[in-house]
Image (cartoon, grey):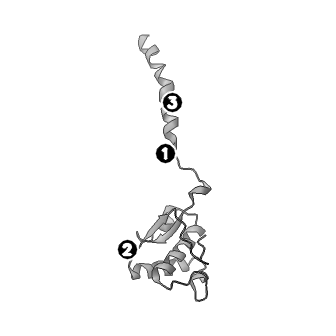
Amino acid sequence: MAGTTFSLPILPFLLMLLLCNAGGMIKTANAQDKTWCVAKPSSTDAELSANLEFACGHVDCTTIQPNGPCFNPNTFINHASVAMNLYYGFHGRNLWNCDYHKSGLITKTDPSYGTCQYA
């Protein structure tokens, strides 16, 4: 009987500990937690070219075409980052939508610049 009375005060403490720790185990969607997918700076031109081909095969990449708002700078890393982010956003912003054989990077910093707005 003494063992039962000893464990009862511990039960509310354990319940409180579990509830306080739940925030670390469950991630909820939050508009303030917006993320973007960009190419890793260490990516090779071959990787970036493959990423461009893949992403633009699934989403509209006219923004990186000549005279498009994201054409300049006219570099593989810029065009790949824009295309990778378009694909990432279109497919739900899931971690796996920005993998690109480990050449994608998820950032919380908006990479938009000038007239090029990352969605």
Q: Nearer the viewer, mark 2 or mark 1?
A: 2
Query: Please, what secondary structure does the residue beneath circle 1 have?
Result: helix
> 98 or 54: nearer the eye?
98
Q: Residues within 10 Å of mark 1 (few under 14, many from 20)?
A: few
Give coordinates of residue 17: x percent, y percent. Answer: 48, 33
Q: Which residue is mark 3?
A: 15
Quadrant of the frame with the N terminus: top left
Quadrant of the frame with the C terminus: bottom right
Q: Which residue is mark 2?
A: 42
Tell me what residue is drawn at x 61 percent, y 79 percent: 60
Quadrant in the rendering for residue 65? bottom right
Q: Nearer the viewer, mark 2 or mark 3?
A: 2
Residue 12's disc number: none
* N-term-proximal mark, 2 vs 3: 3
- In the rendered structure, are the residues bearing label 3 and label 1 in contact, judged by CB atoms less than 8 Å apart? no
Q: Amino acid at mark 1?
A: Met
Using residue 101 as the reference point, say whether residue 80 is left or right of it.
right
Q: CA distance from mark 2 to mark 1?
A: 31 Å
Tell me what residue is drawn at x 54 percent, y 84 percent: 72
Question: Up-down: is 17 above or below 80?
Answer: above
* Count of picture labels: 3
Q: Amino acid at mark 2?
A: Ser
Give coordinates of residue 106: x percent, y percent. Answer: 48, 64
Quadrant in the rendering for residue 102? bottom left
